[in-house]
Image (cartoon, grey):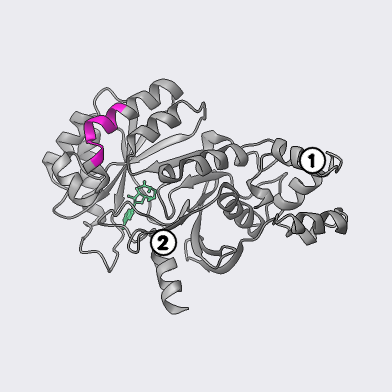
Amino acid sequence: MNLLDLSFTELQELLVSMSVPKYRADQIYLGLYSGKRLEEISNLPKSLVSEFRNKGFDGLNTKIVQKLVSKDGTVKYLFELFDGNIIEGVLMRYKYGNTLCVSTQVGCRMGCAFCASGLNGLVRNLSAGEILSEVILANCDQGGNLNKRAVTNIVLMGCGEPLDNYDNVVKFLRLVSYEKGLNVSLRNVSLSTCGIVPKILQLAEEDLQVTLTISLHATDNESREKIMPVNKAYKIEELLDSAKTYFKKTGRRVVFEYAMIKGVNDSTQCADRLAHILKGLSSHVNLIPLNYVKERNLKGIKREEVYKFCEYLNKLGVSATVRRTMGNDIEGACGQLRRKYIGEN
Ligand code: SAH
């Protein structure tokens, strides 16, 4: 069990059950969220730390094992979890602040044909506290603290399918936005999903202001099924309906990711169909030049062609932009660095 998995109220309740004064909760929260291990929180009595240990409670127990800095300033972190599993996170610098891309699972079981994260399937889910640890560690590493955060925005776009780890991810969202903790506004958080429809509908009911991002990547069921097995369970029509519901409930514009794959989704007909299926839906399309993954047999298209596709969509009235490519020199694509590290160690 990990104290970082607990909300402030749950931590207070735990302390009360141990006959420890409630004010210790503030000290523990401040310590853990400042990147300290339990033993390093100097204002906690040693006896209390031992009692936590005896009860099987740990504090922050993830560590940064590798850090690569790209020419463009993007930082790729490899984190080692308490059980030796490795996950990755990426920090990207923008004018408005720093965005951290976090992993939500070790591996992934969605099996998308272009993605490196799922090559070996799912190992395990991350707990809410483990996802939070990625933010805490990156924030500290970048010189941030609780008063002045170095991580201002978060995207759940690292390894894993967030909605396949629903409860822990929703708990993470509540923890990371809690005012006594990192206090990140959920308006600055994007959750990306391959399209697990019932979970999108459930998320719409949570009363969270998170931006929903849907990895669409294709405009008809036949071609989407070929690259994204999840489409066998939930068809594009249902997926778009769930996006509409999400917008209705939250008022948040839905973002669609569209990684451009040569010969799969790059034709003019695809652009026409995309414009057609998104009609009437308050949305934005993010076009992504495909990151080459050597184990996958798919090719991207030239950046200029992605721009042409984008202009064409804009002419059709679709709000679309091309995603900047960052950190290419440091294996920026999902799951690639982790695979390399595991292979070498
Ligand atoms: N499982 C979630 C979030 C993780 S992936 C999801 O599917 O949305 C984050 C984004 O990167 C997704 O849009 C995913 O489709 C995309 N992606 C994965 N591999 C890619 C690659 N090789 N090139 C470009 N985008 C990729």
Query: Disc 2 marks which amino acid?
Result: Gly
Assign a secondary structure to mark 2: loop
Q: Is residue 224 above or below residue 88?
A: above
Distance (Cα) linking label 2 and label 1: 45 Å
Label 1 neighbour load within 10 Å: few <14, some 14-19, many 20+: few
Can residue 152 be seen here? The reply is: yes
Residue ID for mark 2:
332
Nearer to me, 332 or 227: 227
Q: In the rendering, which numbered label is found on residue 17?
A: 1
Tell me which numbered mark, 2 or 1, is placed earlier along the sequence.
Answer: 1
- Say if the magenta span includes residue 236: yes
Q: What percent of the width, then of the height, locates residue 313? A: 22, 36
Please indicate whether residue 30 sits to the left or right of residue 228 in the image: right
Assign a secondary structure to mark 1: helix
Please indicate whether residue 318 sits to the left or right of residue 109 in the image: left
Query: Disc 1 marks which amino acid?
Result: Ser
Q: In the rendering, which numbered label is found on residue 135?
A: none
Nearer to me, 325 or 299: 299
Q: Residue furthest left?
A: 269
Nearer to me, 67 or 122: 122
- Say if the magenta span includes residue 174: no
* Main SS of residues in magenta: helix
Q: What percent of the width, then of the height, locates residue 279? A: 24, 25
Tell me which residue sits at (41%, 61%) in the image. 332
Span highlighted in magenta in the image: 233-241
Please indicate whether residue 187 sits to the left or right of residue 200 in the image: right
Nearer to me, 161 or 289: 161
Q: Quadrant of residue 15?
A: top right
Can residue 315 be seen here? The reply is: no
Tell me which residue sits at (31%, 59%) in the image. 291
Q: What percent of the width, then of the height, locates residue 307? A: 25, 47
Q: Quadrant of residue 222?
A: top left
